[in-house]
Image: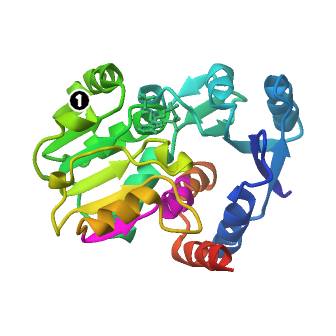
Amino acid sequence: MTDLYAVMGNPIGHSKSPQIHTAFAKITDQDLLYSAILVPLDGFDAAVDDFFRRGGKGLNITVPFKENAWRYADAFSARAKRAQAVNTLIQQDDGTVLADNTDGVGMVRDITVNQNVAIESKRVLILGAGGAVRGVLQPVLEQSPAEVVIANRTVSKAEALAADFTDLGCVSGCGFADVKGEFDLIINGTSASLAGELPPIPAACMTDKTVSYDMMYGAETTVFNQWALDNGAAKAIDGLGMLVEQAAEAFRLWRDVLPQTQAVMNALREDRRA
Ligand code: ATR
C-alpha cells in the first residue's frame, strides 16, 4: 500500500515540500504519496487526527502550526526539546506521535557537506534570537565551534537564548553594535531580509575568508548576502540548501534512507531562474 505523508500549514500553496519529497521518493524508489494540506486556523488537531486515522505515516508542519504540533505530540527528540519547535511528526508503531525538528541538522549539513565549509573550531556569529535561531543552535554547537556569538536587536533576547545553551559550548549574546572581532561564518537568522532590511553589524567582523549564510532565500541575492559580498566575503550562501536538507532529514526519519539532495537543489534553482 502507498504510504501517505503531507505538509500542513496555512497558507500552504507556496510550499515546495511536495515537489521535494516526491523527488526524494523517486530517487530512493519509495512508494509514497506526499501532499500539501491547507488546515483551517482552528482545525489543526482535527486535521492531524484525521490524517493519521486515514493511515498517514508522517507530517511536516509549517507556519502557523509549529506550536500546535508541539502540543499535539506524545514524545520529542532531544533537539526538538531544545528548539522548542517542531517541523516533523512521525507516527510510531505503537500509535504514538514523535516530534522532531530537522531545521538545524539541515542547515549544518548544507554548510558542512554541500558547501564544504567547516564549523568546527571556527568563530560563528548568528544574527537574530527568535525561533529560527533557537531551532538551529544545538546542531551548530554540536559541530564544536570555537565560539558562537548571538547578536540581536533586542539584546536581552540574545542573552537569554545564549544562556539556554551554555551547557553545549561557548555561546554568548549581545547587541549588533557590540559585535567585536572577526568571524569565519556569519549566519543571518533574523526576519529582517523579509522586509529588505539589514541587521546593522560592524563591517569589521568580515574578512576575505568570511562565509555568510542567510537562512532566507529568494529569486535574487538576499540583502544580507549582498552586503556580505560587498564587504569582501569569500562566499555567500542562501537558505535553499537548508530547505532541501531539512526535508531530507525528515525523509530519513520516516523512511530510514537519506536521499541524495543535489539533483533536487539544482531543479529548485532552475525553477527560481525561470
Ligand atoms: P523567527 O521564527 O523567524 O525566528 P521571530 O521569532 O519573530 O521569527 O524572530 C525574528 C527575529 O528577527 C528576531 O531576532 C528579531 O529581532 P527582535 O528580537 O529584536 O525582534 C529579528 N528581526 C526582525 N526584524 C528585524 C530588523 N528589521 N532588523 C533586525 N532584526 C530584526
Q: Residue at 34% across / 37% down in the picture?
A: 138
Q: Residue at 67% across / 40% down in the picture?
A: 62
Residue linked to disc 1: 174
The C terminus appears in which quarter of the rendering?
bottom right
In the picture provided, is 262 more to the left or to the right than 54?
left
Q: Tell me, yes or no, whether the highlighted magenta stretch contains residue 249.
A: no
Q: Tell me which corner region of the image, top left, top right, bottom left or bottom right, holds residue 31.
A: bottom right
Q: Residue at 40% across / 48% down in the picture?
A: 198
Give percent across and percent down for residue 222. 47, 61
Q: Tell me, yes or no, whether the highlighted magenta stretch contains residue 240.
A: yes
Q: Nearer the viewer, residue 71 or 217?
A: 217
Vertical placement of residue 193 versus 71, above or below: below
Q: Amino acid at mark 1?
A: Cys
Q: Nearer the viewer, residue 3 or 175?
A: 175
Q: Is residue 257 visible?
A: no
Dot 1: within a 10 Å radius of its alpha carbon, few (fewer than 14), some, or many (20 or more) residues? many
Vertical placement of residue 229 versus 246, above or below: below
At mark 1, the secondary structure is strand
Q: Nearer the viewer, residue 7 or 93?
A: 7
Give percent across and percent down for residue 115. 35, 70
Q: Nearer the viewer, residue 94 or 212?
A: 212
Magenta residue span: 234-246
Marks counted in the figure total 1
In the picture provided, is 127 more to the left or to the right than 269?
left
